[in-house]
Image (spheres, rainbow, N blue to C red):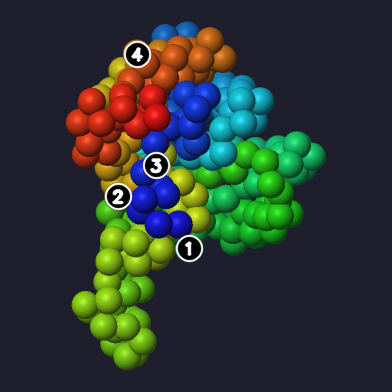
Amino acid sequence: MSADESTSPDRDNGLPRHVAIIMDGNGRWAKKRLLPRVAGHRAGVETVRQAVRLCAEKGIEALTLFAFSSENWRRPVKEVSLLMELFLTALQRETQKLHGNNVRLKVIGDRKAFAPRLQEEIAKAEALTQDNTGLTVVVAANYGGRWDVVQAARCLGEDIAAGRLRADDITPELFESRLVLHGLPEPDLFIRTGGEQRISNFLLWHLAYSELYFTDVLWPDFDTQAFEDSLVSYAGRQRRFGRTGDQVEQAGSA
C-alpha cells in the first residue's frame, strides 16, 4: 500500500477505515469496585467484543487493539501471568466466533517471549481466519512502536548487506512495507480510554496523520455509545494531510 493510499481522505460516509485503541483503565475500574485488577481485565474482554461487533456492523476495515505492550512486562509477575492466561483463554473461546463472522485476526508484536502454547494458539487463530474478508482485528501483544521501527530497519539493513538493496532505494513506502501493519490502511482514528493523553509507544510510524481522541471513560465502561461518541467526534473533524482548509473544502465539493 502506498503512502498516498494509506493517508487518503475520508470515505464519503465519514467513518474511519481503521481505528486503533489503547484500552486503558482496567485496573482502575477494578480498584474502584474493590476487586482484583484481573477482574478489570476480564471485564475489558466484553468491551472488546462490543467494539468488534460495532466495527463489523459499520463496515470499518480494521480495528487495532493495544493488548500488551513491550513495557508491560514490568508489571507484577502475578498480573502478567494472569494476563497471559486471559489472552490464551480469549483466543480459544473467541477465534471460532470471529471466523464465523468473517473476521480476520492478526497479532502483531514480538511473540518469542510468549509461552510455546500461546504462540501455537496465535498461529492457529491467524491461520484459521487468514482468508476472511470482513473486519480485520489486530491485537498488539508484546508490541512497541520503537521495536517495530527497529525491526523494519534491521530487515532493510539485512537486504543492503546481502546486496539486494541500496541505501538510496529506501523510501517511506519501502520502509512501511517492513512494518508489521503492512497491508492495512494507517489508522484514521486513535482512541485512548482512561484519561491519559499520550501515545505510549503505540504505532509510532502509523499515527502520523491519525485523529487523536482521548476520553476519561475507563475501558470496561467504553460501551457502544461511548464508541459512537468517538466516531461522531471524528466525523466532525477536517483532515487536511498538508493541504489548506480551503483546498479540502474545494475537493469535497468537486
Lower position in the chain sequence, tag 2 or tag 1? 1
Discs 3, 2 touching: Cβ within 8 Å: no
Count neighbours of disc 1 (C-alpha within 10 A) and say few if under 14, some if 14 to 19, many if 20 or more.
few
Q: Position of residue 113 (x, y in %)?
A: 46, 59
Mark 3 = which residue?
8
Lower position in the chain sequence, tag 3 or tag 1? 3
Q: Quadrant of residue 32?
A: top left
Mark in the foreground, 3 or 2: 3
Q: Tag 3, which secondary structure? A: loop
Q: Position of residue 146 (x, y in %)?
A: 28, 54
Q: Position of residue 79 (x, y in %)?
A: 45, 36
Mark 2 = which residue?
205
Mark 1 = which residue?
112
The residue positioned 27% from the left and 66% from the top of the image is 171
One can see residue 26 in this view: yes
Between marks 3 and 1, how big is the CA–CA gap?
35 Å
As shown in the figure, which amino acid type bears the numbered disc 2?
Answer: Trp
Between marks 4 and 3, how big is the CA–CA gap?
30 Å
Question: Looking at the image, which is closer to me, 98 or 163?
Answer: 163
